[in-house]
Image: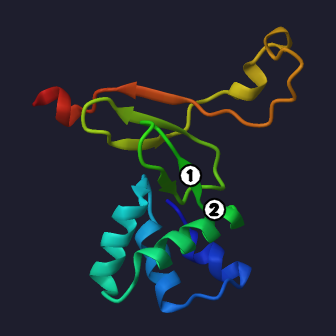
């Protein structure tokens, strides 16, 4: 589970009411919301929060390295609070549900030197695609 609020408190990040509600919306396991989804959920808790405040807060959280931007469908960017535990994503090709997965092994280490073409590789993004149980049964 994400511990976003605790991490932000530990950093001494000033938690205004708006920042707190954005962090609360993002906090949790398997959270991969778009900015518009974050805004809608935040506005349900704090009606006066503006879309600009949500976008600015998301940008700050990404800059701090506390939230990562995820693009799994080449459309809206999604925001993932599980920025400090290496993981990949499993995406349903029908409904778009995203789950964090932690496969064994190290994909960065598993890339042979001959396949690096001289690159100094620092990061790997793997997206597994399939059909979730809900879509498969329906």
Assign a secondary structure to mark 2.
helix
Neighbourhood count class around disc 1 (C-alpha, 10 Å): few under 14, some 14–19, many 20 upward: some
Residue 123 locus on image (x, y percent): 73, 36
Q: Is residue 48 left or right of residue 81?
A: left
* 119 lies left or right of 3: right
Residue 99, image x, y percentages: 41, 43
The answer to which of 125 and 47 lies nearer the viewer is 47
Q: Which quarter of the figure has residue 66?
A: bottom right
Residue 31 visible, this orientation: no
Quadrant of the image occupied by residue 49: bottom left
Question: Which residue extends farthest left?
Answer: 138
Q: Residue at x 56, y 31 (%)?
A: 103
Query: Between 30 and 68, which is closer to the camera in this rendering?
Result: 68
The CA span between labels 1 and 2 is 7 Å
Q: Are marks 1 and 2 in contact (CB under 8 Å)?
A: yes
Q: Residue furthest top?
A: 114
Helix, strand or loop at label 1? It is: strand
Residue for badge 2: 62
Q: Is residue 126 left or right of residue 111?
A: left
Residue that label 1 marks: 69
Name the residue rendered at 30%, 71% in the picture.
40
Q: Residue at (74%, 28%) from the top-left corner?
A: 108
From the viewer's perspective, is residue 101 above or below residue 51? above
């Amino acid at each position: 589970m994400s511990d976003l609020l605790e991490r932000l408190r530990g950093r001494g990040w000033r938690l205004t009411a708006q920042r707190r509600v954005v962090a609360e919306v993002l906090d949790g396991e398997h959270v991969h919301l778009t900015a518009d989804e974050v805004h809608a959920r935040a506005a349900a808790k704090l009606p006066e929060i503006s879309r600009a405040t949500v976008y600015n807060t998301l940008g700050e959280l990404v800059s701090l390295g506390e939230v990562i931007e995820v693009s799994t469908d080449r459309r809206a960017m999604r925001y993932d609070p599980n920025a400090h535990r290496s993981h990949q994503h499993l995406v349903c090709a029908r409904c778009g549900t995203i789950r964090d997965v932690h496969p064994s092994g190290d994909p960065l280490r598993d890339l042979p030197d001959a396949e690096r073409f001289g690159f100094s590789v620092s990061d790997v993004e793997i997206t597994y695609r399939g059909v979730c149980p809900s879509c498969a049964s329906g």
